[in-house]
Amino acid sequence: MRFINTDSSKVSVRWSACSLTALLLWQASAWAEEDWFSKSRQILQALDGQERPEWLDGNPTQAEAQRQAIDVFRQSKSVLMKDAFKPGDLNSATPKLAVGKPLSVMFISFSMGTAALKGIFQEASGQNDVLLVLRGPKPMQKLPALFAELKTLLKEIEPLPNIVIDPVRFQKYAVTSVPDMIIEEHGKASLHVKGITSLAWLKDRQQQGKQGDLGSLGTVYKIAEMDLLAEMKSRLAAIDWQQKKQQVLARFWEQRHFEVLPTALEDRERLVDLTVTAPRDLTDPNGKLLMRAGQTVNPLDKMSFGLCLLVFDGTEQAQVNWSKTQSCSDNKARRMYLATQLPRQEGWEALKALENTLNAPVYLLTPDVRTRFQLEHVPVLVEQSSKQVVIRERKVSGLALGAAL
């Protein structure tokens, strides 16, 4: 959340902890729209050919990417085979992988043949320091079909060996053919060999103190399964992100809720007291008491409001013109424009045109601000009057520029 800056050098009274707490309670509702406006401004800059805002990359486009590649994305995570079967499908549990000891990792594929795979599964059965790794399902094959195929091979093997789908490991160790075996210690391969399917042979070489890459010592096969990570990247690259961004921007205005207020039929002024009452004891993170339950404080006793709020209907040109010509009682107060609504069809173009007209940022009115200042009609000017806030509703008509207050 971005808050409006206040020039503290002009505040002659030092705040007490209670006063600061009261002011924050008061400001929290008034500036609720700041985060939205910050984002809208970034989008408008992007539409002018400037840098793409980070928040857009991290939110709607990411969601769209997940929708486009949801199957691939889910499959790209390491999946333990024991979690793919329902209770009772197999007769025994999979042993938990050993922690803090070297791990024998064998990269496998269905291209090796069912007989070879079944032999590997039987040897790995019951060994908690062995991990068998598949890259993913075969092209056009869904995970349930892959699980069913594995289930057939594992039917008479007890206990189950540790088998995972882990394309990340394939990429990490640059595995391009199978069988490929490593001894994994502390996230690195201390021993590496290709073309061997005997786990006992690998462990024997480890016990002999062998290290490094032993090369290819037998027949190797191409990997039959697809590379899920490469597939995901391919799908993401095929997405038209510019089109997706435009769709996101268009949907924003379709879904946006506006705080619409009726048009003022007469000039009227009201005073609003910003005094707050603590609903309970308020403490800081260290437990120090800041305000007792029932204690009241008016933030305007300690510092000025510092703002001049101009709230108007952005679809009414007369109200826009009125807002542009108004004068604030405090010339040093920051003018802030709040629109109750904008034309949905024009959306961002309407917002941009409005800001160009007013030569200032335009915010959308939020429920918190509407409630805090008890706003009832527009256009209205909100500013400080002594120790209270005055609400000045004005009747405007036609396209007249209106008179200054």
Image: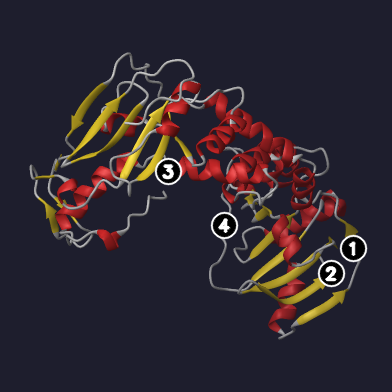
Q: How far apart are marks 1 and 4 (CA)?
A: 29 Å
Query: Does label 2 or label 4 sit earlier along the sequence?
Result: 4
Q: Earlier in the sequence, mark 1 or mark 2?
A: 2
Rendered position, 27 above or below 202: above
Please give the label number shown on residue 220. Answer: 1
- Looking at the image, residue 328 sits to the left or right of residue 125; the answer is left
Looking at marks 4 and 3 on the same chain, the residue that comes earlier in the sequence is marked by 3
Kindly report which numbered mark, 4 or 3, lies closer to the viewer in this rendering: 3
Type of residue at label 1?
Val
- Quick check: marks 1 and 3 in contact, CB under 8 Å? no
Return the residue found at the far bottom: 209
The reply to whether callout 3 and callout 2 are in contact (CB within 8 Å) is no
Amino acid at the residue labelled 4: Pro
Residue 95 image label: 4
Name the residue at the front extreme: 403
Name of the residue lying farthest toward the right: 219
Quick check: marks 4 and 3 in contact, CB under 8 Å? no
Which numbered disc, 1 or 3, marks the residue closer to the eye?
Answer: 3
Query: On the image, numbered disc 3 is attached to which residue?
Result: 34
